[in-house]
Image (tube, grey):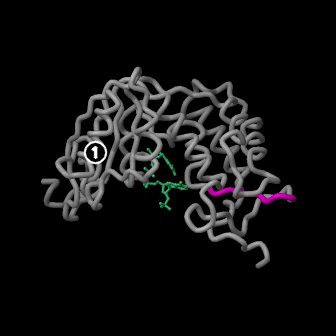
Amino acid sequence: SSEHMKWNGTGSTAHFQEIVLERCYNYTQLVQPALRDRDCQKIREAFRNAFISKDPCSATEEDYHPLMKLVNQTVPCDKTVFWSKTKELAHQYTKVQREMFTLEDTLLGYIADDLSWCGDAGSHEMNYQSCPHWKKDCSNNFVSVFWGLLSKRFAENACGVVQVVLNGSISNAFDGKSTFGRVEVHNLNPMKVHMLQAWVIHDLGKFPSDSCSGSSINDLSWIIKQRNIKFTCQDNYSSVKFLQCVKKPEDSSCR
Ligand code: DN4
């Protein structure tokens, strides 16, 4: 009903509970059997309890602590891949590079990827009509707080050499206001992370708008070095470039 259309964002994903449960079993039994002892029923319940019957604009990190505690997954050193404005490409990259992890290759990121969820104070139901939009309604909504907390922990736990896939076909490949720039960069632990390798990738057939020699990457380099972490950058890193060429082999840059 229209009285439920109180927010400007997409409503909860239909069959949210079933999708969470199915993705959890798929991941823990098939994708990463090392996590086969995780209790997916409990994970589904803890996820739901984090936001159900609560004001959808008053989310806190504490709401998700029981869920985080149940999952407790670590990524091996040298295997962390961050991304910003390059989601599809970064996911293709970790799919072919065995054992590499974007946040969405960890259990909680895998479960929540592309889903939307919110409840309402005074209701036991999810709101399938609308949820708060992070820019138009409130930033402390349950989806934003979830990704913010997950991104922070993903960065805090990274070790060794870490990578980031950035988009060279937009004006600022590094954006200090993105989750990568705002959260992940500042939560890398210099005691554990030796180096950040940035790959700046241009879309095939598009004019490059930014590169390793541009000012946004210079800003990133400065922030990282300031934090006592080594920084390298490469334009159109071949392992990622080849993935684009598989999709569009006729492009002149693929010959
Ligand atoms: P991005 O490509 O600018 O954003 C990735 C997605 O996150 C877009 O759909 C954004 O929505 C959305 N997003 C960004 N900030 C927020 C927020 N505060 N509340 C709700 N949605 C938001 O890249 P990015 O640098 O912001 O985020 C990518 C990095 O952060 C990766 O390294 C991941 O580890 C992690 N992360 C992943 C996800 C995800 O899988 C979400 C957030 C962060 P819009 O700008 O299109 O509206 O979805």
In the picture provided, is 18 more to the left or to the right than 167? right
Q: Amino acid at mark 1?
A: Val
Residue indicated by mark 1? 240
**Image x and y of residue 126, in percent:** 77, 58
In the picture provided, is 217 more to the left or to the right than 119? left
Which residue, as the protein is rendered here, is positioned at the far top?
A: 191
Instruction: Count the numbered circles shown.
Output: 1
Which residue, as the protein is rendered here, is positioned at the far front?
A: 226
What main secondary structure does the magenta stretch of the protein show? loop
Give the image quarter of residue 131: bottom right
Vertical placement of residue 108 versus 73, above or below: below
Q: Residue at x 86, y 59 (%)?
A: 123
In the picture provided, is 68 more to the left or to the right than 123? left
Give the image quarter of residue 141: bottom right
**Image x and y of residue 137, in percent:** 63, 66
Q: Nearer the viewer, residue 223 or 255?
A: 223
Vertical placement of residue 240 versus 197, above or below: below
| Mark 1, other Cα within 10 Å: few <14 / some 14–19 / many ≥20 | some
Q: Residue at x 36, y 53 (%)?
A: 175
Q: Nearer the viewer, residue 105 or 166?
A: 166
**Image x and y of residue 64, in percent:** 69, 40
Q: Residue at x 26, y 40 (%)?
A: 221
Q: Nearer the viewer, residue 72 or 176?
A: 176
**Image x and y of residue 122, in percent:** 87, 59
- Which residues fall within the magenta stretch? 116-122
Q: Nearer the viewer, residue 140 or 47?
A: 140
